[in-house]
Amino acid sequence: MLALVRSMNGDHPARPVLVASNDPNASGLAKAAACGIPTAGVDHRPFGKDRAGFEAALLTHIDAAQPDIVCLAGFMRILTPGFIRHFEGRMLNIHPSLLPKYPGLHTHARALAAGDAQAGCTVHEVTAELDAGPILGQARVPVLPSDTEDDLSARVLTAEHLLYPAVLRRFASGDRTPVLLG
């Protein structure tokens, strides 16, 4: 989130209008507030299995901010098709693998177990199918023989901080040509 926020200055075609989280105590909210960005924390836990109820509460904050683009970053909740339709064609997410390889969780462990020579991250448009929307960018990093999950995760995170801002800049300019790094 901070990499995106920090990138949106000067001639960047986008500006942050809200940082929201499903954890009212998320450190990102305080960091965003320190940057002067409005924040909203909607705790998902009181909603139990009522995902649509949680999303309705979250939407009141998002819709009030009137974003042109919604960027998910570290948001680890599966969204309902209705929520996704609400932002169809304008919601992005970053995933720590070279999709379509390794959708879902435990991506670094899966890449290491498979003996992959490369790993990376993908920015994609969010669709109802998990981690399967159109790819808007990918960054590749080497998998080193001595890598642990933590080593690989750190290297991929560095790539994420370069890729996501580059994709957002291009996407906000109306260009969906994939950004390829590494």
Image: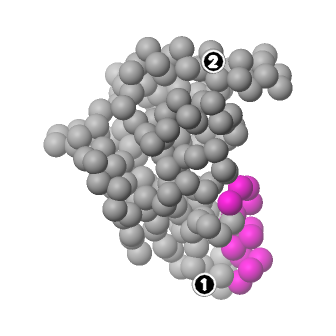
**Quarter location, residue 21:** top right
**Quarter location, residue 23:** top right
Q: Nearer the viewer, residue 48 or 36?
A: 48
Q: Is residue 128 above or below residue 60?
A: below
Q: Amino acid at mark 2?
A: Ala
Q: Nearer the viewer, residue 76 or 69?
A: 69
Q: Nearer the viewer, residue 170 or 31?
A: 170
Q: Percent position (x, y) of residue 158? A: 47, 60
Give the residue at the far right of this rendering.
49
Q: Is residue 20 magenta?
A: no
Disc 1 vs disc 2: Cβ atoms closer than 8 Å?
no
Question: Where is mark 1, residue-wise?
Answer: 117
Q: Amino acid at mark 1?
A: Ala
Question: Where is mark 2, residue-wise?
Answer: 56
The answer to whether residue 158 of the structure is visible from this angle is: no
Q: Secondary structure at mark 1?
A: loop
Q: Percent position (x, y) of residue 85? A: 56, 34
